[in-house]
């Protein structure tokens, strides 16, 4: 990935690390361990029932015995286990009221040898420390009672980093909804294209169509469904603009002449086969070895 970014000029040596934002379905600490040798910083949401641990306290002078592996626990749902945060910020937002973000440094989860860590080499599992960020807002859209969002970052955060991180996480939802519209409404993944160049051209056509919908937002009419709420003037989503784009498209000047009606071509004559085979693009898979044939040959030998 980084080789492609470097060749394309999107990332150069000396630039800030690349921020990767994931949801709670991904093991963010596992990803941070696997990508530790790359200039990457991981930010992921954690479930609200998680329990993390602080570093172990220093060993007292003269005390014998094994040093503790972990320090005090930090339970997301138990406020009594949460000490004074290292960073606290307050931000006034447009849709959520006041957003209060608090952060604690040097917290790591307790790793066990199952799932992603089942194949880890023998020995003790690593200690992956990071910063835990708790985001609490006043209200959500619809006056719902919001629950706090817990984030884990693979680095040490300052006050400026905390505000930037939780805003980047919320921005991720906008990107996900945009990709969802590309696929479900604009048909980004509908055609079964055979050539990578054709897929690139189709992607640019979808982006151009989305740009037209964004530009036509102040001109389109809100043709909402009966169960949808009215949208503010000039704030229509691209999906709603698409409903009224047909009416808008007929009133705009057309630089090109209208297409001439025609009928379908004759096509391939009946009884003939297509002599032009489609190009096959390798996907990197390898066939499994024929174990039965190898066993037969070894037995005959």
Image (cartoon, rainbow, N blue to C red):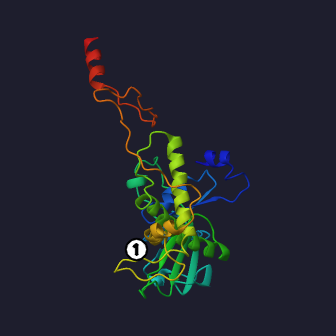
Point out the residue furthest to the top here. Answer: 301
The crowd level at tag 1 (other Cα within 10 Å; few <14, some 14-19, many 20+) is few
Q: Is residue 246 left or right of residue 254?
A: left
Q: Residue at x 37, y 43 (%)?
A: 264
Total numbered circles: 1
Q: Is residue 70 visible?
A: no
Which is nearer the eye, 285 or 238? Answer: 238
Camera-nearest residue between 253 and 44: 253
* Residue linked to disc 1: 49
Residue 59 seen in the current view: yes
Image-quadrant location for residue 132: bottom right
Looking at the picture, how far across and down is residue 223, in whole percent? 42, 76
Q: Quadrant of the C terminus?
A: top left
- The answer to whether residue 175 is above or below residue 102 is above
Residue drawn where x is 44% and y is 43% of the image: 193
Is 285 rendered above or below residue 99? above
Q: Position of residue 40 (x, y in %)?
A: 61, 57
Q: Nearer the viewer, residue 143 or 236?
A: 236
Q: Position of residue 208 (x, y in %)?
A: 55, 58
Report helix, strand or loop for mark 1. Answer: loop
The answer to whether residue 128 is above or below residue 231 is above
User: Whole-percent x and y of residue 206?
Assistant: 51, 56
């Amino acid at each position: 990935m980084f080789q492609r970014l470097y060749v394309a000029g999107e990332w150069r040596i000396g630039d800030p690390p690349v921020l990767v934002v994931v949801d709670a379905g991904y093991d963010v600490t596992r990803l941070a361990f696997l990508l530790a040798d790359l200039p990457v910083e991981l930010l992921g949401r954690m479930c609200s029932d998680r329990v993390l641990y602080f570093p172990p306290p220093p060993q007292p002078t003269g005390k014998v015995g094994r040093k503790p592996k972990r320090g005090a626990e930090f339970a997301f749902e138990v406020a009594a286990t949460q000490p004074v945060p290292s960073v606290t910020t307050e931000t006034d937002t447009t849709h959520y009221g006041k957003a209060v973000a608090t952060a604690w440094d040097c917290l790591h989860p307790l790793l066990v040898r199952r799932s992603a860590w089942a194949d880890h080499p023998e020995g003790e599992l690593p200690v992956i420390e990071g910063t835990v960020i708790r985001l609490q807002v006043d209200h959500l859209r619809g006056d719902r009672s919001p629950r706090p969002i817990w984030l884990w970052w693979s680095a040490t955060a300052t006050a400026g980093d905390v505000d930037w991180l939780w805003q980047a996480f919320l921005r991720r939802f906008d990107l996900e909804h945009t990709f969802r519209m590309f696929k479900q409404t604009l048909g980004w993944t509908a055609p079964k294209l055979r050539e990578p160049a054709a897929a690139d051209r189709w992607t640019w056509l979808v982006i151009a169509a989305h740009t037209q919908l964004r530009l036509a937002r102040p001109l389109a009419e809100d043709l909402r469904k009966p169960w949808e709420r009215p949208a503010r003037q000039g704030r229509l989503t691209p999906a709603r603009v698409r409903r009224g784009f047909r009416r808008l498209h007929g009133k705009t000047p057309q630089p090109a002449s209208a297409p001439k009606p025609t009928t379908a071509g004759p096509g391939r004559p009946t009884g003939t086969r297509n002599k032009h085979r489609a190009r096959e693009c390798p996907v990197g898979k390898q066939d499994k070895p024929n174990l039965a044939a190898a066993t037969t040959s070894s037995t005959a030998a």
